[in-house]
Amino acid sequence: MQLSIQKIFLKDLLTIRDKVFRLTKPFLVTNEEAEDSTHGVVLKLWEMDDQRLNNPNSIQA
């Protein structure tokens, strides 16, 4: 069950990644800057999901 939830999250994360890149690109000068920004957002979402899975009762998660 946990594995299927992770697969769903990863699929959703990849979809979000594309949307974030398209959103950030017009505001940043280069593709590299947009990729860096997108990477930061994806990493934060990944960490937030990891916190939630490891400590479901945490208020911060």
Image: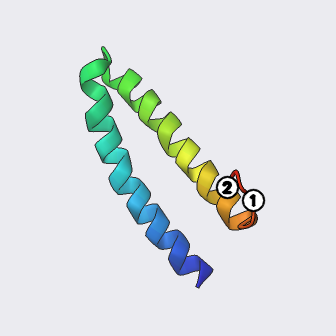
| Quarter of the picture holding the C terminus | bottom right
**Among all residues in the image, which is located at the extreme bottom?**
1
Q: Residue at x 49, y 44 (%)?
A: 42
Crowd class of label 1 (few under 14; some 14 to 19; many from 20; radius 10 Å): few
- Pick the quarter of the image with the N terminus: bottom right
- The answer to whether 46 is drawn above or below residue 5 in the figure is above
- Which residue is identified by label 1? 58
Q: Amino acid at mark 2?
A: Ala
Rendered residue at 67%/66% (across/down): 53
Residue 43 disc label: none
Residue under pointer 2? 61
Q: Nearer the viewer, residue 16 or 56?
A: 56
Q: Residue 12 appears at what percent x and percent y?
A: 39, 61
Q: CA distance from mark 1 to mark 2?
A: 5 Å
Q: Could you tell whether 34 is left or right of 48 in the image?
A: left
Picture coordinates of residue 26, whole percent (x, y): 24, 23
Q: Are marks 1 and 2 in contact (CB under 8 Å)?
A: yes
Secondary structure found at label 2? loop
Q: Is residue 36 left or right of residue 29?
A: right
Q: Position of residue 19 (x, y in %)?
A: 29, 44
Residue at (36% x, 27% y) in the render: 34
The quadrant where residue 8 appears? bottom left
From the viewer's perspective, is residue 13 above or below residue 56? above
Looking at the rendered structure, the kind of residue marked 1 is Ser
**Left or right, residue 8 beside residue 45:** left
